[in-house]
Image (cartoon, grey):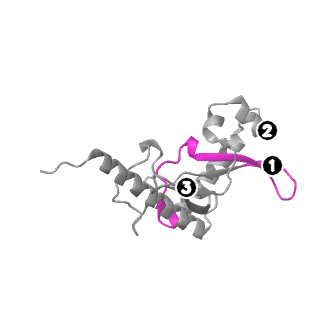
């Protein structure tokens, strides 16, 4: 029985994840899914490597806010995150996941480091709000018509879409 070179297996897995990520970003950008980062360009680097360039998303990772990092809270003009802000962020994330699922994409790793936050001012200059944007579709899968995926789970089990 022939042995598989482990480095070629890892390389293939990385290439598959890259193709999935690019495919998922192309799909979400074309559909203008609210709350998911938009693909700007794919730029060749050196050798077989490419860079995926996304729109600017808020400067603060949700994980820093969850850990109550003082610099992150100050950057968002917060002393602490209110229940109203938490509810609003969760609503935005649910809507982003519904949008992704509506076009057949499962994120598979919506955890705090993959959500960027930014303080935005409402158009009518009323109250400001926190805008949550989902990034990093590296573990995304394209879902079948029935909403399931036959691909192995690649994200963290706690943060994987229920369909996968």
The residue drawn where x is 46% and y is 55% is: 47
Spot occupied by residue 6 in the image (x, y as percentages of width and height): 28, 45
Q: Is residue 128 above or below residue 149?
A: above
**Magenta-drawn segment:** 101-130
Q: Nearer the viewer, mark 1 or mark 2?
A: 2
**Are the residues at dot 1 and dot 2 in contact (C-beta closer than 8 Å)?**
yes
- Disc ID at residue 77: 2
Residue with the most extreme front position: 46
Please indicate whether residue 49 sits to the left or right of residue 31 in the image: left
Precedes in sequence: disc 2 or disc 3: 3
Measured Cα–Cα span from mark 2 to mark 3: 32 Å
The residue drawn where x is 56% and y is 57% is: 52
| Residue 54 visible in image | yes
Determine which residue is flagged by label 1. Answer: 128
Spot occupied by residue 61 in the image (x, y as percentages of width and height): 63, 41
| 135 or 93: nearer the viewer | 135
Spot occupied by residue 15 in the image (x, y as percentages of width and height): 40, 56
- Crowding at dot 2, Cα within 10 Å, few <14 / some 14-19 / many 20+, comes out as few
The residue drawn where x is 49% and y is 58% is: 21
Query: Is 111 included in the stretch rendered in magenta?
Result: yes
Determine which residue is flagged by label 3. Answer: 51
Spot occupied by residue 49 in the image (x, y as percentages of width and height): 48, 55
- Crowding at dot 3, Cα within 10 Å, few <14 / some 14-19 / many 20+, comes out as few
Quadrant where the C terminus sits is: bottom left
Please indicate whether residue 103 sits to the left or right of residue 124 in the image: left
């Amino acid at each position: 029985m022939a042995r598989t070179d482990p480095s070629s297996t890892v390389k293939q897995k990385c290439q598959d994840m890259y193709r999935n990520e690019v495919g998922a970003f192309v799909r979400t950008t074309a559909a203008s899914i609210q709350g998911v980062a938009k693909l700007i360009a794919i730029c060749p680097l050196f050798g077989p490597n490419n860079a995926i360039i996304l729109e600017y998303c808020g400067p603060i990772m949700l994980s820093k806010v969850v850990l109550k990092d003082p610099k992150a809270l100050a950057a968002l003009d917060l002393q602490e995150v209110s229940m109203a802000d938490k509810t609003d962020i969760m609503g935005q994330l649910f809507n982003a996941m519904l949008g992704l699922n509506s076009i057949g994409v499962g994120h598979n790793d919506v955890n705090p480091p993959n959500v960027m936050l930014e303080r935005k001012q409402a158009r009518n200059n009323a109250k400001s709000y926190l805008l949550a944007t989902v990034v990093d579709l590296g573990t995304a899968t394209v879902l079948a018509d029935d909403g399931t995926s036959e691909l192995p789970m690649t994200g963290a089990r706690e943060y994987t879409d229920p369909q996968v």
